[in-house]
Image (spheres, rainbow, N blue to C red):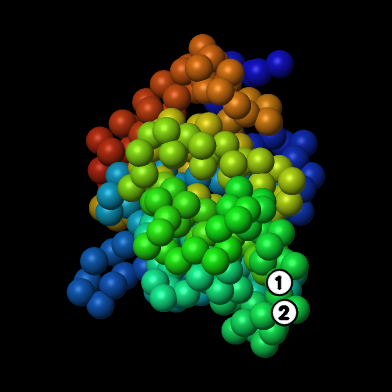
Amino acid sequence: MILEKVTETPAASDERPMLLSLRNVGKVFSNGVTALSKVDLAIREGDFLSLLGPSGCGKSTALRLIAGLSTPTSGQLDWRGPIDRSNTGFVFQEPTLLPWASVFDNVWLPLRLKGVSRAKAAPAVMEMLARVHLNGFENAVPRELSGGMKMRVSIARAMVTRPRILLMDEPFAALDEITRFKLNNDLLELWQDERFTVIFVTHSVFESVFLSNRVVVMAARPGRVFDELAVDAPYPRDEVFRTSPDYAALCRQASDVLVNAINSTAGSHHDGH
């Protein structure tokens, strides 16, 4: 049964172990811009969490802090259990593929950097290419691929090390709607099979609700958590769900929160707790 509601907090009965906590995290750039202010966020093992908000609200900054590509100005990130760069995959907005390298060699790259030979890496690379539906394209080069296929290569490259957490910074924003829908479906299938944790940055209410079990709505000036919504629709989600009244209702509720976040000011916001 699809629950026709969005709740403000995750279910109290959620016993999944905590993976990461952001505690009072702030980030001020060298030019004086406050990108993030007093961000508190808890991520559990197996979450599919979307960061939803307007440009300038600090979504990508938060992702870069989690990835270790930047450091907070204040507050702290508290990882539960051993984790390092090898436990984390990052998919950027652009595929960032090596243009001269084959699809196989692009996906092999993270393993190559860890000292894994091409021959030894081959089973893992080919398995991940199959998982993103790129069977038979291992010898192609990026210029021979469509935009959607390039993003599939980028996802395979991020996943080939079997990370515990996958960070995705608006990976489908530049794609046409049909390709975006297909990649949303395939990403959910991969996530359900592998049960890694996803933090997904998006501007799209529709995408965030379709993919996520949690949507964190952010507001700008300064960048902060405005509210959090738990999406109580069951997985797997498919085209039946995408065209259902339940999905439409969930999107309307998320959209209302986003509008409030956009219209909020630093002096009148609440943190959703």
Report whether 136 appears left or right of 52: right
Question: Which residue is drawn at the image coordinates 64% and 18% (left, top)?
Answer: 3
Report if residue 80 is visible in the image.
no
Callout 1 secondary element: helix
Local crowd size for mark 2, using a 10 Å CA cut-off: few (<14), some (14–19), many (≥20): few
Q: How many marks?
A: 2
Decide: is 150 above or below 254. below
Quarter where residue 202 is shown: top left
Q: Which residue ends up furthest to the bottom in the rendered image?
A: 115
Say which residue label 1 marks.
122
Q: Assign the N terminus to one quadrant of the image.
A: top right
- The residue that disc 2 covers is 119
Q: Position of residue 219 (x, y in %)?
A: 34, 45
| Residue 36 vertical placement versus 9 (above, below) | below
**Residue 225 x/y as whole percent:** 43, 48
Front residue (pair 269, 260): 260
For label 1, the crowd category at 10 Å Cα-Cα, with few meaning under 14, some 14 to 19 and many 20 or more, is some
Q: Nearer the viewer, residue 5 or 171?
A: 171
The reply to whether the C-beta atoms of the residues labelled 2 and 1 are less than 8 Å apart is: yes
Position of residue 54 relative to residue 258, above or below, is: below
Residue type at numbered disc 2:
Ala
* Relative image position of residue 25 (x, y in whole percent): 46, 64
195 sits to left or right of 269: right
Residue 33 shows in the view:
yes
Q: Residue 197, how many percent across, how many down?
A: 65, 53
Is residue 262 toward the left or the right of residue 137 in the image? left
Could you tell me which residue is drawn at 40 percent across and 67 percent down?
Answer: 96
Residue at 44 percent of width and 48 percent of height? 148
Q: Is residue 244 left or right of residue 197?
A: left
Work out how far the residue at label 2 is from the one at label 1, CA to CA, in angstroms: 5 Å
Amino acid marked by disc 1: Ala
